Image (cartoon, grey):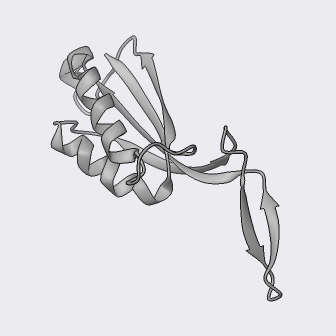
Amino acid sequence: MISIEAVVRPERVNQVTAALEAVGCRGFYYYNVTGQGRQRGVEVFVGRSGQMASRSSVPKTVVCTVVSDEMREQVVEAIIDAARSPGGQEIGDGKIFIYQVADVVRVSSGERGDAAL
């Protein structure tokens, strides 16, 4: 089993979760974070005067799921296709992190491993 964690633009989270469901990913969760990567922040309007200010961190959404090893490439490709900006590759489109999972236990039944997914 593997855990896949994707950091994506908040405006793309609906497309990413729909893509996960389309490839058969049955469970996932997501949460909003703020951080900085290669994008190095953004310029924003502040106050009523319309002055520009630089924000070093930007909002992102982290989408997490745990899937069987066989689903790895399908899930990764689905996330890439859904998270990528419509015009093509852009800095800030996100990153995907993949981790090995030693075990999973379903609390309600005590099932373990793939059966618990």
User: Which residue sits at x=41%, y=53%?
Assistant: 87
Q: At which x and y percent is residue 80?
A: 36, 37
Give the side of residue 88 with respect to residue 76, left or right: right
* Residue 43 position by quadrant: bottom right
Q: At which x and y percent is residue 85?
A: 42, 51
Q: Is residue 40 above or below residue 54?
A: above
The residue sitting at the top extreme is 102
User: Which residue sits at x=72%, y=45%?
Assistant: 40
Q: At which x and y percent is residue 44?
A: 73, 68
* Residue 79 position by quadrant: top left
Give the side of residue 76 with respect to residue 95, left or right: left
Q: At which x and y percent is residue 97?
A: 48, 26
Q: Nearer the viewer, residue 52 or 9?
A: 52
* Residue 47 position by quadrant: bottom right
Q: Is residue 52 above or below residue 3?
A: below
Q: Is residue 86 above or below residue 73?
A: below
Q: Is residue 69 above or below residue 56?
A: above
**Does any portion of residue 46 appear in the rendered image?**
yes
User: Which residue sits at x=67%, y=38%?
Assistant: 38
The residue sitting at the front extreme is 87
Q: Nearer the viewer, residue 97 or 112?
A: 97
Q: Nearer the viewer, residue 68 or 50?
A: 50
Q: Which quadrant: the C terminus? A: top left
